[in-house]
Amino acid sequence: MSTRKKIFFVVLFLIIDVFLITGFFVLRNSVMVSIIDKETNKLATLDLATDRFNLKIRTVGKYKNVEDCMKSYLDNIALTLQDSLLIVKNPELTKILSYENYEKDGPDFTQSLSFLEKSSNDFNTNFDILLNSLDEESIRSYGKEKIKDGYYQNLFNRFMLRDDMKDKYQKTSLLLKDSKSNINHIFETSYRTLTFLVSHKDEWQLENNEIQFKTDELMNEYNSLISSLKE
């Protein structure tokens, strides 16, 4: 075989190798993007208020980082939201205006008022963080911070900001705002009721599993505060 033919075959094999390698990476990238798309479909069906988003990572390489960032970001939101909403089931809050608590912590209600202040501050701080986390700019900033390569940043934004995902964030934001308003009403009314009792601590007493006031006016004011919890 002549030298010219040898060179020809070497070049031919190199070209074939390049095409094969290129084809492999193109196919691999297509498969990884398809997997992220399917995983995003799963994420879109989950509820931030009740579900976890720490699903198994299905991709590899830098795609794995994109998928992990998506699931970690959403799971952190879900955990913070679910933990914050537990306050409505906390016996210390649900029983704060009970005869039992009046007997235990009255008439100055030092522990109860301290609990309300701290719980309210923690709750509102968490909810403000959550609302901000659902904002498009915050999502983009997170991707930029965690993913350095521009292509993969764009991939993160592409799937995290899909229309169905944006719809999820919007619905969750509405839930957050509604829950924040309702729970703050509980905090505020409970606080007002206890401070009322502290201000008039010499004008009420506990008797026969009931709170009794010295005047009808005070009783009516107290009942009005309690009734406002149901509004």
Image (cartoon, rainbow, N blue to C red):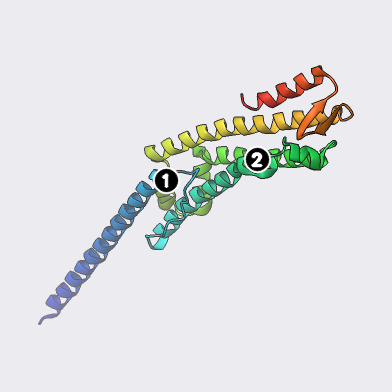
- 212 relative to 132 in the view: left or right: right
Residue neighbourhood size for the residue with mark 1, other residues' Cα within 10 Å, grouped as few (<14), some (14–19), many (≥20) = some
Residue 196 visible? The answer is no
Residue that protrudes farthest toward the bottom in the picture: 1
Check the image and report above or below for 57 versus 91: below
CB under 8 Å between discs 1 and 2: no
Residue that protrudes farthest toward the front in the picture: 208
Look at 72% across and 38% down and name the residue there: 96
Of pointers 1 and 2, the one earlier in the residue sequence: 1
Where does residue 5 sit, x and y in percent of width and height?
A: 12, 76
Quarter-wise, where is residue 226 in the image? top right
Residue bearing mark 2:
123
Where does residue 202 sit, x and y in percent of width and height?
A: 89, 29
**Disc 1 from disc 2: Cα separation:** 23 Å
Q: Looking at the picture, tell me which residue is in the foreground, 69 or 120.
A: 120
Q: Name the secondary structure under disc 1.
A: loop
Residue that protrudes farthest toward the left in the picture: 1
Residue 87 visible? The answer is yes
Look at 45% across and 58% down and name the residue there: 65
Residue that protrudes farthest toward the top in the picture: 217
- 5 relative to 197 in the view: left or right: left
Look at 33% across and 51% down and name the residue there: 38
Q: Name the secondary structure under disc 2.
A: helix
**Which amino acid type corresponds to the residue marked 1 in the rendered image?**
Leu
Residue bearing mark 1:
46
